[in-house]
């Protein structure tokens, strides 16, 4: 899919009644919805390649092979057509989270 169109498709889909119903159901489990993506060298949206996850650590996002950050918990998932299962697309390094009083 062309990079600029992934954003357009996602933005259009979010108002679809079927998608709204899926989001409502996901919310019962504390889950939401996201658009797995990265940015190209010009800053435009680009699809997140299969096997790659976004990784947040110390408030910085980087991109890694999923196996490189296998010890970190997943915080977002997507469908993998090749594997026919749900796979992580975003992970966080919770060991580096710091609690800041009075901030949510």
Image (cartoon, rainbow, N blue to C red):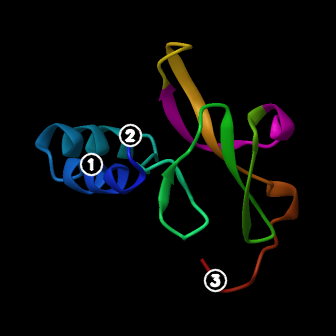
Q: 85 left or right of 8?
A: right
Residue at x 73% of width, y 42% of height: 73
Q: Position of residue 27 (x, y in %)?
A: 37, 46
Which residue lies under the disc numbered 1?
Answer: 9
Quadrant containing the C terminus is bottom right
Is residue 71 something that shows in the picture?
no
Marks 2 and 1: in contact by CB < 8 Å?
yes
Mark 1 to mark 2 CA distance (whole Å): 10 Å
Q: Position of residue 7 (x, y in %)?
A: 35, 56
Camera-nearest label, 1 or 3: 1
Give the answer, above or below, for where 86 lies relative to 90.
above
Is residue 1 something that shows in the picture?
yes
- Counting residues from the N terminus, which is met first, the one under dot 1 or under dot 3? 1
Camera-nearest label, 3 or 2: 2
Mark 3 to mark 2 CA distance (whole Å): 39 Å
Camera-nearest label, 1 or 2: 2
């Amino acid at each position: 899919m062309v990079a600029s169109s992934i954003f357009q498709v996602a933005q259009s889909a979010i108002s679809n009644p079927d998608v709204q119903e899926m989001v409502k159901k996901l919310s019962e489990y504390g889950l939401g919805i996201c658009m797995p993506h990265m940015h190209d060298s010009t800053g435009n949206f680009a699809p997140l390649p299969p096997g790659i996850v976004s990784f947040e650590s110390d408030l910085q996002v980087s991109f890694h092979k999923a196996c490189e950050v296998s010890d970190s918990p997943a915080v977002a998932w997507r469908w993998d057509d090749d594997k026919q299962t749900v796979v992580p697309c975003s992970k966080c390094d919770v060991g580096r989270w710091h609690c800041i009083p009075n901030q949510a």
